[in-house]
Amino acid sequence: MHPALLLLADSRLPAGSHAHSGGAEEAIRSGAFHDLPSLRSFLVGRLHTAGLVSATFTAAAHTLAACTGEWVMLDAEVDARTAAPAQRAASRLQGRLLLRVARRLWTGRALDELAEAVPSPHHPLALGAAAHAAGTTRGEAALAAAYHSITGAATAAVRLLGLDPVEVHALLAALAPDLTTVSAQADAGSAQGGWAELVAVSAPGLDLLAEGHEAAEGTLFVS
């Protein structure tokens, strides 16, 4: 495993991911989950839907970073798969912050081209370009995206429900096979067909949670 993958997967990287709960805050408020077993169900569902899409487009962005152009087209495909306006805004905010940090950490033509073509790209594009610039493989980039899709919600659950952080991380460790499956599926899927043919699974529940969070008052997380 490339050392840079650990940096990209670390929520302490100053790219804003620690401020997003991945829908967990609204899920807790609405009663969608309240303990470890229900948190596990939430994380598994998130990983195999939004996580798969994110990992696939991260892998596609990693591939594109080795070529030239088409960032606007790839970004539009992510947009088409992100139904909730609140989720689009959260993805672009995290993408812009990650791209800004990545350009300070690594040098790469693709990072500059992405910033010029899409100043506020969706997070998977920024992550894929950053992973390429850092020297990781496409599969490692997909794994970082899959991991990112569940750790924000898991961390938020610790803070919001007062869950035992060791038990929550044990839960994450137990999901390692799922992470491997999703990242491998994303890696393989990103190489098949054009951008429009990439995976387009949906998670309406996450869309509703995102919009509910947007309308809520006194929230702790941005999304």
Image (tube, rainbow, N blue to C red):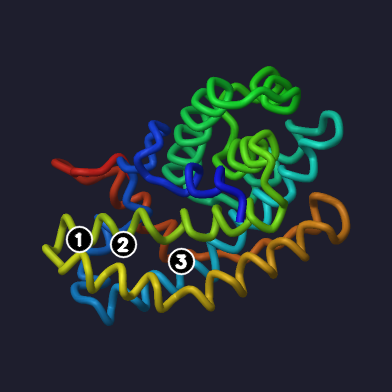
Residue at (48, 59) in percent of width and height: 147
Q: Which residue is mark 1?
A: 158
Query: Residue 46 bears which disc, if any?
Result: 3
Q: Which residue is mark 2?
A: 154
Look at the numbered discs 1 and 2 and tell me whether their residues touch, using CB distance below 8 Å. Answer: yes
In the rendered image, which quarter is residue 187 located in?
bottom right
Q: Residues within 10 Å of mark 2 (few under 14, many from 20)?
A: many
Residue at (86, 52) in percent of width and height: 194
Q: Secondary structure at mark 3?
A: helix
* Residue nearest the observer in this picture, 85 or 20: 20
Q: CA distance from mark 2 to mark 3?
A: 11 Å
Kind of residue at badge 2? Ala
**Dot placed on the residue nearer the N-terminal end, 1 or 3:** 3
Look at the numbered discs 2 and 3 and tell me whether their residues touch, using CB distance below 8 Å. Answer: no
Q: CA distance from mark 1 to mark 2?
A: 7 Å
The percent coordinates of residue 120 (x first, y second) are 56, 27
Q: Secondary structure at mark 1?
A: helix
Q: Residues within 10 Å of mark 3 (few under 14, many from 20)?
A: many
